[in-house]
C-alpha cells in the first residue's frame, strides 16, 4: 500500500488519505456499522454512488460520500440515507446534501465534517419538498417513527464517544443562546450525562428509557422530561449535587444532545465518558496551564490491572481529576466480584451488596479543583450508588488543615492501593515554608563525597515542582506493603540533580515495574515523555524482579487520531505471564541503577557493555580522560549574526555529522562577543576540542578542522576538551561515533520533551583505550579525512579568489 493511502472501511479498497476520508468518511462509516448496526453490504462508499444534478438529467453526476440502502442490492430505488462529508475546515455542504436528497429516492441525510454533524429528513407537502432537522437517524431495522423509543435493553455501548462529544460541543457553541463558554457548556453536558447514566441504571431492561428524543416530538416536551429526570438525580444524590444546580440549555439544544446520545449505553462504554466529555469541552486551553492532563483509558486500565486491586483494598487517587482511575478500579473489583459470585452461586442481592460496600467504603479521591472534584464525586455516586469518598482538598497541604469530613475518611499510612497522574510542570510550583517543610523533598539535598551518598540538608527550598512532592505524599498515604502506580515525566527519572529522589524511593520500598509510555500518549493536549512507576512501600515483603516495559504505540497519533496500533494494552499480559520480548522483560533488583529510565536496561545496551568490557583492552570512563566539559554558548539574539567575512564561525547542531562538520550549515557571529560575552569566550574551540550534539539527534561527535579553530560551539552542543597525554582526540571521535559508543550514548539520552545527553551521564561512558600508538593509527584515518576536506575548501576558496581577480 502506498504511504499516503488508507484502506476504506466499507469497500476494503485502497484509497487516498485525504482529510475528508480520515476525519469524516471513515469515522462515520465505522459508526454506521458498529453503532447503528448497518451491514457493510448495505453501504456504498467506493466506487461512489451518484445522483442527478437536476431532475431532467439523464446522467448522474453528483458523487455521494456514503450511501446506505435498504438491502444489499444497492439499487437506485432502494437508497435510504445519504451522508455528505467534508473536512474539518469546511462548514458548507448542507445545501449540497439537500440537493442530493431532492434528486434521489433517499429521504434521510447526514452532514458530517469530523467535528460537527446534523441529521435531516426530506418531506413533501403540497407538492413541494421541505427539509427539517431530526434528532438522529434510525438504527438498522428501526422505523423512522421509532427513533428515541428505545427500551433499556436496546442501548449499546460504543467504542469511542469523542467524535460524538466534539459534534455536541461545536453544535452547542454555535447555536446555544446564553452559554458559549466551554466551562459552562461542560457543566451542562455533564449534568445531561448524569441524567443519562441515572436513566440507564434505574430503568428496567424492557422499559422505555426516559432519556430520549422522538422524531416528531416537540423540543419543549423533551426539555420537560429531561429536567424532571435531573430533579430525580439531584434528590437521590443530594450530598453530591447542589439544589441550585440546573440544566440551563434551551429546549432545542437539550433535544440535540439527547438525540446524539440516546442510542448508546454509557455505563458500559469502553472509555471513561466523563473524561472524554471533559477533554472535549474544557480541553488544553483551560487545564493545561494547571499541569492537568487526562490519562488515556488504555493507560488507566493498564495501571489498574497491574496493581490488581480486590475488595479488601482501600484505594486512593490524591489527584483524582474527574475520577478515571477510581472508576476503573471500581469496575475492576466489580468484575472480580461477578466472577466470585458466579463461582459460589451468590444471589443477586448479596452480590449487589458486596459491590456497594466497595463503592461506599473502599474508594477515596482528592482533587484541589472544585469543579473536577464535583464531577468525580457525582460520577462515583451515580456509578457506585452511594455516598462518595471524593473530597476537594489540596493533597499537598498539611492534612491537619484539611476539612474535618476529609480527615475522617482519609488517613496518612492507611491505603493499600494508590493510582494517580499528578499535575506536573515548572509553571505551577509549590511554595510556602509551612507546606514545603512537611517533606524531605522540600529541603535541598547534596552529595556527600566522603560517604558517597545523598544527604538532606537543613536548607528549605523556595519552591518545588508538584510531581516531586506528590511522590513523597503518595508513599506516605500507603501503609506498609501498600502498592502504587504513578505517571511521571521521564525527565526526573534520569536527571542527576534528582538522583537523591530515586535513592529515597528505593530506601522507602521496592520499585517493581517501570513502564515507559509512547511520546504521543497525552497528545494532542501535550507531547511529553512519561513513564509509570510501580512501587511497593516497605521492605518486609521479598523484593521482586523489576518489570521493564518500553512502548512505542499508544493507539493514536500526535493529533489524537486513532491508529489501531497500541502496545499499552499488551503490557499486563507480559507482566503477568513473565513472557519476555525485546521491549518487555524483567531485571534483578541488584541490576537497578540510580536511574529509572526504562530503556537503559534494554538487552542490546547490556550486551554492548559486555563486549566493551571483554575487549581485552583497557577500559576507562570518559570522565577520567576529560580535562574540561561544558555546554556550548546559547545565543538567542539574531542581531548578533553577521556575514561570513565579518564574523567568527558559530557551529550549530545541524552542522555536526559523522562525516565531519558541514560548513553549509554554519553561522557567523560578531567578533566583539569574544570579549563581551564570557559564555562565548569559554566555548572557543581548538584542534584538540571535540564537539558533540546533546539534544535532538544527540550523541554525534566531530573533531575541529583547522579552518574552524577559534570558532564557537553553540548551545545544543557539548564542548569537550580531553587530556591528549592519555587519548588521541581523533581516535576518541571515531570510537564515540562507532556502534560501541553510539549504543552507550543512545542509552543515556533522556528527557521529558527532547531526548538529550547530560554532561554528568556522558562522563560515565566507557571507552576502550588501547595504547596511544594504536589510537594514533586509528585516529590518523579521521585526521586525514578532516584535513583533506579543509584542503579542498581552501582550494575552492583560492579558485574563487582568482576568478574575482579576473574581473578586477
Image (spheres, rainbow, N blue to C red):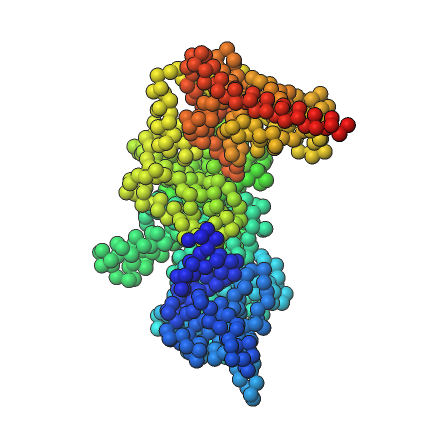
Q: In terms of image quadrants, where is residue 76?
A: bottom left
State left or right for residue 307 relative to residue 116: left
Between residue 108 and residue 333, name the one nearer to us.
108
Task: Please determine whether, in this image, residue 676 is positioned above or below residue 35.
Answer: above
Q: In terms of image quadrants, where is residue 635?
A: top right
Extreme residue toward the front, this view: 806
Q: Position of residue 713 (x, y in %)?
A: 61, 26
Between residue 662 and residue 70, name the one nearer to us.
662
Q: Residue at x 35, y 46 (%)?
A: 570
Q: Residue at x 63, y 26 (%)?
A: 796
Q: Position of residue 462 (x, y in %)?
A: 59, 31
Between residue 447 and residue 724, name the one nearer to us.
724
Extreme residue toward the left, this view: 344
Task: Please determine whether, in this image, residue 182 is positioned above or below residue 290.
Answer: below
Quarter of the image with the C terminus is top right
Between residue 662 and residue 588, name the one nearer to us.
662
Extreme residue toward the right, this view: 808
Res 400 seen here: no
Res 804 seen here: yes
Q: Position of residue 675 (x, y in %)?
A: 71, 20
Q: How many marks?
A: 0
Q: Residue at x 43, y 14 (%)?
A: 774
Q: Residue at x 58, y 58 (%)?
A: 182
Q: Position of residue 538 (x, y in %)?
A: 36, 33
State left or right for residue 496 relative to residue 617: right
Amino acid at each position: 500500500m502506498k504511504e499516503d493511502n488508507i484502506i476504506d472501511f466499507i469497500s476494503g479498497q485502497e484509497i487516498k488519505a485525504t482529510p475528508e476520508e480520515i476525519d469524516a468518511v471513515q469515522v462515520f462509516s465505522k459508526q454506521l456499522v458498529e453503532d447503528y448496526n448497518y451491514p457493510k453490504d448495505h453501504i456504498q462508499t467506493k466506487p461512489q454512488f451518484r445522483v442527478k444534478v437536476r431532475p431532467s438529467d439523464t446522467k448522474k453526476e453528483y458523487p455521494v460520500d456514503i450511501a446506505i440502502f435498504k438491502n444489499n442490492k444497492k439499487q437506485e430505488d432502494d437508497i435510504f440515507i445519504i451522508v455528505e462529508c467534508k473536512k474539518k475546515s469546511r462548514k458548507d455542504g448542507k445545501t449540497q446534501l439537500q440537493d442530493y436528497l431532492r434528486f434521489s429516492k433517499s429521504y434521510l441525510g447526514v452532514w458530517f465534517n469530523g467535528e460537527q454533524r446534523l441529521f435531516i429528513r426530506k418531506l413533501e407537502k403540497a407538492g413541494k419538498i421541505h427539509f427539517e432537522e431530526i434528532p438522529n437517524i434510525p438504527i438498522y431495522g428501526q422505523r423512522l417513527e421509532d427513533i428515541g423509543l428505545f427500551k433499556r435493553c436496546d442501548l449499546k455501548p460504543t467504542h469511542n464517544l469523542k467524535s460524538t462529544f466534539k459534534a455536541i460541543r461545536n453544535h452547542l457553541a454555535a447555536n446555544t443562546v446564553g452559554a458559549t463558554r466551554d466551562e459552562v457548556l461542560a457543566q451542562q453536558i455533564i449534568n445531561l450525562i448524569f441524567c443519562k447514566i441515572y436513566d440507564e441504571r434505574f430503568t428496567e431492561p424492557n422499559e422505555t428509557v426516559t432519556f430520549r428524543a422522538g422524531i416528531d416530538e416537540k423540543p419543549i416536551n423533551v426539555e420537560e422530561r429531561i429536567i424532571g429526570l435531573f430533579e430525580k438525580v439531584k434528590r437521590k444524590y443530594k450530598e453530591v449535587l447542589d439544589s441550585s444546580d440546573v440544566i440551563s440549555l434551551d429546549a432545542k439544544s437539550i433535544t440535540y444532545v439527547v438525540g446524539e446520545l440516546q442510542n448508546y449505553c454509557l455505563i458500559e462504554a469502553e472509555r471513561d465518558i466523563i473524561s472524554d466529555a471533559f477533554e472535549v469541552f474544557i480541553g488544553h486551553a483551560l487545564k493545561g496551564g494547571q499541569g492537568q492532563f487526562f490519562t488515556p483509558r488504555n493507560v488507566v486500565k493498564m495501571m489498574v490491572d497491574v496493581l490488581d486491586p480486590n475488595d479488601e483494598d482501600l484505594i486512593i487517587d490524591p489527584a483524582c481529576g474527574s475520577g478515571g482511575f477510581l472508576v476503573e478500579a471500581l469496575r475492576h473489583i466489580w468484575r472480580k466480584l461477578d466472577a466470585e459470585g458466579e463461582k459460589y452461586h451468590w444471589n443477586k442481592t448479596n452480590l449487589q451488596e458486596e459491590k456497594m460496600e466497595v463503592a461506599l467504603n473502599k474508594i477515596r479521591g482528592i482533587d484541589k479543583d472544585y469543579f473536577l472534584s464535583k464531577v468525580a464525586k457525582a460520577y462515583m455516586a451515580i456509578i457506585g450508588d452511594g455516598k462518595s469518598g471524593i473530597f476537594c482538598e489540596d493533597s499537598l497541604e498539611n492534612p491537619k488543615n484539611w476539612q474535618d469530613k476529609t480527615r475522617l475518611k482519609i488517613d496518612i499510612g492507611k491505603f493499600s492501593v494508590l493510582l494517580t497522574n499528578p499535575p506536573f510542570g515548572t509553571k505551577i510550583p509549590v511554595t510556602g515554608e509551612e507546606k514545603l517543610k512537611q517533606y524531605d523533598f522540600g529541603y535541598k539535598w547534596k552529595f556527600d563525597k566522603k560517604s558517597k551518598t545523598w544527604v538532606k540538608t537543613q536548607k528549605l527550598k523556595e519552591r518545588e515542582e508538584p510531581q516531586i512532592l506528590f511522590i513523597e505524599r503518595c508513599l506516605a498515604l500507603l501503609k506498609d506493603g501498600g502498592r502504587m502506580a504513578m505517571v511521571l515525566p521521564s525527565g526526573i527519572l534520569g536527571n542527576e540533580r534528582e538522583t537523591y529522589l530515586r535513592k529515597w524511593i528505593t530506601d522507602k520500598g521496592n520499585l517493581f515495574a517501570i513502564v515507559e509510555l509512547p511520546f504521543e500518549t497525552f497528545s494532542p493536549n501535550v507531547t511529553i515523555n512519561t513513564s509509570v512507576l510501580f512501587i511497593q512501600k516497605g521492605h518486609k515483603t521479598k523484593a521482586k524482579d523489576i518489570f521493564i516495559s518500553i512502548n512505542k504505540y499508544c493507539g493514536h497519533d500526535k493529533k489524537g487520531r486513532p491508529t489501531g496500533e497500541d502496545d499499552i494494552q499488551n503490557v499486563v499480559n507480559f507482566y503477568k505471564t513473565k513472557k519476555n520480548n525485546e521491549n518487555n522483560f524483567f531485571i534483578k533488583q541488584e541490576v537497578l541503577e540510580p536511574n529509572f529510565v526504562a530503556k537503559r536496561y534494554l538487552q542490546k545496551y547490556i550486551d554492548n557493555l559486555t563486549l566493551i568490557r571483554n575487549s581485552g583492552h583497557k577500559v576507562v570512563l570518559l570522565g577520567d580522560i576529560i580535562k574540561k566539559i561544558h555546554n556550548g554558548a546559547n545565543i538567542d539574539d539574531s542581531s548578533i549574526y553577521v556575514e561570513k567575512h565579518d564574523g567568527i564561525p558559530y557551529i550549530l547542531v545541524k552542522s555536526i555529522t559523522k562525516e565531519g562538520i558541514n560548513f553549509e550549515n554554519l553561522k557567523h557571529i560578531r567578533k566583539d562577543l569574544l570579549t563581551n560575552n564570557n559564555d562565548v569566550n569559554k566555548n572557543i574551540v581548538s584542534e584538540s576540542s571535540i564537539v558533540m550534539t546533546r539534544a535532538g539527534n544527540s550523541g554525534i561527535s566531530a573533531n575541529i578542522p583547522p579552518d574552524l579553530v577559534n570558532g564557537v560551539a553553540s548551545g545544543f552542543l557539548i564542548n569537550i576538551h580531553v587530556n591528549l597525554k592519555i587519548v588521541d582526540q581523533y581516535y576518541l571521535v571515531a570510537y564515540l561515533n562507532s556502534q560501541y559508543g553510539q549504543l552507550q550514548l543512545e542509552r543515556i539520552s533522556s528527557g521529558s520533551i527532547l531526548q538529550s545527553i547530560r554532561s554528568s551521564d556522558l562522563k560515565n561512558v566507557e571507552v576502550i583505550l588501547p595504547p596511544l600508538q594504536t589510537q594514533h593509527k586509528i585516529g590518523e584515518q579521521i585526521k586525514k579525512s578532516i584535513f583533506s576536506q579543509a584542503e579542498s575548501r581552501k582550494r575552492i576558496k583560492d579558485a574563487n579568489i582568482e576568478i574575482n581577480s579576473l574581473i578586477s
